Image (cartoon, grey):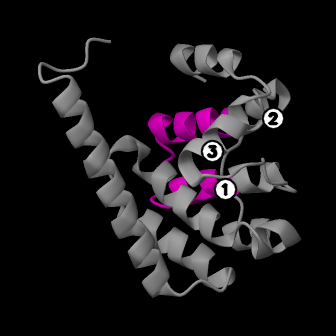
Amino acid sequence: MTEAMTGAVAAAGPGTAMWLFGQDWTFTTVPDFGDIRAYAKALLVAARGDGVLAPEERDWVLGYIGTLTGGDRGLLRELAAYPADEDVVALVEGSAVLSRVARVPLVFDALRACDADGVIAPGEIEQIKRLAAALGIPEETVDRLQEAHHREKAARAARIALVFPDGTPY
């Protein structure tokens, strides 16, 4: 875990998950993830789909999961050391919640995790599509999720450029 990530995780608290779900998805309650460990591991395995788990990808997953769990240090330490070498299909098949309720969010979050280093590599897309197929999500939906992610990323970049035309100060 990088120094910046350690600081971000230390700042996470019980209300951070509710804020994130409200901000990203307009939820009014925090959903029961069931197995957040399997969710996080599936994100890391997908991000390693090109054979390399970039530090930015691991940090994105740790920051995201840290926010969702209020900074569960034990889980974050486990994920920081996790080699991400398990079969992604086996990870999700063992969880009724992931294979039922969190199917599409898991695929979308996998795209975001894979793009944390600035590129979604072909091997990562392959791994995500394999995950999606195991969850019963059509390839066309994965393509549409990827397009939505790219539009969201472009909108964020445009907003930042408008607010900070000389570059971000921090």
Q: Position of residue 29 (x, y in %)?
A: 77, 48
Which residue is located at x 62 percent, y 17 percent? 6
Please tell me which of labels 2 and 3 falls first in the chain.
3
- Mark pair 1, 2: CA separation: 17 Å
From the image, tell me which residue sits under label 1.
Answer: 85
- Mark pair 2, 3: CA separation: 23 Å
In the shown orientation, is residue 96 left or right of residue 142? Answer: right
Marks 1 and 3 in Cβ contact (< 8 Å): no
From the image, tell me which residue sits under label 3.
Answer: 22
Foreground disc of the pair 1, 2 = 2
Q: Position of residue 9 (x, y in %)?
A: 66, 22
Relative height, residue 164 to residue 53 (above, below): above
Please tell me which of labels 1 and 2 falls first in the chain.
2
**Mark 3 neighbour density, 10 Å: few (under 14) some (14–19) many (20 or more):** some
Marks 2 and 3 in Cβ contact (< 8 Å): no
The amino acid at mark 2 is Leu
Residue 75: numbered disc: 2
Foreground disc of the pair 1, 3 = 3
**Which quadrant of the figure contains the N terminus?**
top right
- Mark pair 1, 3: CA separation: 32 Å
Was residue 49 drawn as part of the magenta stretch in this picture?
yes
Please tell me which of labels 1 and 3 falls first in the chain.
3
Which residue is located at x 77 percent, y 29 percent? 70
Q: Which residues are magenta?
A: 41-67
**Mark 2 neighbour density, 10 Å: few (under 14) some (14–19) many (20 or more):** some
Which residue is located at x 61 percent, y 74 percent? 131
